[in-house]
Image: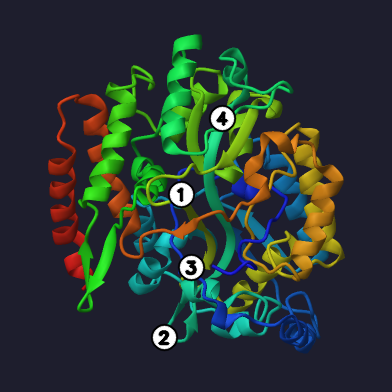
Amino acid sequence: MKKKIISCLLTITVTASLLAGCGGETNQVSGDKQTSTEDKQTSTEDKQDTSVGEESQEPEPVTITIGNWPSKDNDTYALREKQREAFEEKYPYITVETDEYGYGVDTFLAKAAAGQLPDLFQTFFTEADKIITAGYAADITEIFNNSIFAGNMEQDVLDLVTKDGRIYGVPQSAYSMGLYCNVNLFKEAGLVDEEGVPLFPTTWDEVAETAVAIKEKTGKAGFMIPVTNNQGGWIFSNIFWCFGGVYETQEDGKWVATFDSEEGVAALQYLKDLKWKYNVMPDNVIGDLTAWTEKFGTDQVAMGICHQPYANSIISLTGMSKDSIAMTTIPSGPAGQMSQMGGDIYMMAVGTTPEQQDACLKWMEFSGNSPSMDEDAVANYEASVKEISDMDWIVGAGGLTIWGDDAEVTIKQKEIDAKYANVDLRLWPYAENPGAGITPEPPVNAQELYAALDAVIQEVLTNEDADCQALLSEAAYNFQRDYLDNAN
C-alpha cells in the first residue's frame, strides 16, 4: 500500500473511536495508480463551482436520515446534536433525522429487504461488494463525480465501492491494528524502564514471555482475545498472518480455502498454548470485545489486540485513564510483522433521490469527512477534537487516513490534532509507524470466515485436548462448501 494511504493522521475521530468489532477488506494499493499533487489540485479547482455546498438557486426542502447516531446516554450525543443543529442552520432546506442503527452482519439484509435502512449508513470494507451485489446500495456516480470527493481519493480505495464503473459509496476511514498494553499491570510486574515506560514485546514469543511474567508477578491474566461476534477470527488474523498463514487463494480462477495449512495450524497452536501451556488467559475465555475491554480497563488483563481508534472506547466504557493505555505495533512472527487493515464506508440506501444523495454528501463534508476543510468543516473538526480532549480522551496517538499527505483535510487535521495532543508518545510506539506491515482482510466472505474461526478458537481455548489441525481442516472444508464454492 502506498505511503499516501498509510500516512499518519494524528487523530481519533468521534465516530471511529466508538466503533468496535468491525472487520474490513480492501485491495492492496499499488504504486502505479498514484495521483499527483498537481493533478489533485487541478481536479479540486475544476470542481469548485459544482462541489457540495454550492447553490445557484434556493433548493426544494429535503429530509435525510443519518444512521449510526449515538444514543442519548452516549458520551458523543451532545456533540453530534450540536453538529446537526449547525448543519441545519447552514442548510435550512435540509432536515436531518437520526437513526441509531449500526451495521450488523446478522441484521443488515433483513433491514434492507424491509426498506428500513437510514438514507446514509455505514458499513465495513469487507461488506461493500456484498451490499452492492445484493442491490441495497444506491448508485451515486453522478452526484459523486460532481462533488469535492471526486479526484481526491486514491483509486484503489475508491475501487472498494465501485462495480462495473459505477460508484456506490464513499470510503470514510481506515485503521490498522496493534498490541494494547495495560501500563498499570506492566508497572506492577516491574516490566517498565526507569521512566515507567512499558518494555514492549516485539515478537510473539516475547508476548508469551511477558504474559507469563505478568501472571506470575500480579496474578492477573497476561493476554486475552475476544472469541464471539466474529471478533475472534477478526483479531486472530493478526497472529495468523505473522505465522505465514493465507486464508484464501485463487487457483485457476476459483477461490480455495487454504487456512488449514501448516502455518495456520502453528498460529492456532500458539493461541492454544497461551491458554494451556503458559496459563496466561482469564479463567473464563468466552466473551466479545466488550468483555476484553472491561477486563483490560479494570486492570484484569495486561495485553490484547485491537484497532487504534478503539482506545477511546476503552476510556468511555470503563473509565480507564488515558495515561494507563499504551499501544505498540503488532509483534513479529515467523513470517514477519502483519497488521490487519480495515475500515468503514458510507453508503446510501436504494431509493434515495439525487437531492437526498447531495444532502448526504453535504453532511459528510460539513462534518469533516471529505478531502476539503472549509471554515465550517474546520470548526466542526476542532470542536470534536476539543471535546475529546476536554473529556480527557486520547488525542494525538496516530492512525491511518484514506487521504494523501498533501490533502487539505490531512494538513488541517494534523494542525488541529497537534494543538490538542494530550498523550505521552513514549506510550504509543504505534504512532511512529501506524502502517507497519499492514495487510488487507480476506477478499471473499471475510465476516463469514471470522465467524467460522470464532468456533475454532473457542474450542481450542476451552478444550485442552483439541486438535488444531483437525479443527482447521473441518472449518476450511465447510467454508469452502458454504461460501467459496458459491463465489467461484
Q: Mark 1 to mark 4: distance in Å?
A: 21 Å
Q: Residue at x 31, y 53 (%)?
A: 245
Residue underneath mark 2: 164
Query: Which percent across, then down, holds residue 367?
Result: 73, 59
Q: Is residue 261 visible?
A: yes
- The amino acid marked with disc number 2 is Asp
Proximity of marks 1 and 2: CB atoms separated by less than 8 Å: no
Q: Quadrant of the C terminus?
A: bottom left
In this rendering, the label closer to the viewer, 3 or 2: 2
The tag earlier along the polypeptide, 1 or 2, is: 1
- The amino acid marked with disc number 4 is Cys
Task: Determine whether the residue tagged by mark 4 lies in a helix, strand or loop.
Answer: strand
Q: Mark 3 to mark 1: distance in Å?
A: 20 Å
In this rendering, the label closer to the viewer, 4 or 3: 4
Residue underneath mark 1: 22
Q: Residue at x 25, y 71 (%)?
A: 250
Q: Is residue 18 visible?
A: no
Q: Nearer the viewer, residue 92 or 53?
A: 53
Residue underneath mark 4: 181
The tag earlier along the polypeptide, 3 or 1, is: 1
Q: Mark 1 to mark 2: distance in Å?
A: 26 Å
Proximity of marks 1 and 4: CB atoms separated by less than 8 Å: no
Residue underneath mark 3: 349
- The amino acid marked with disc number 3 is Ala
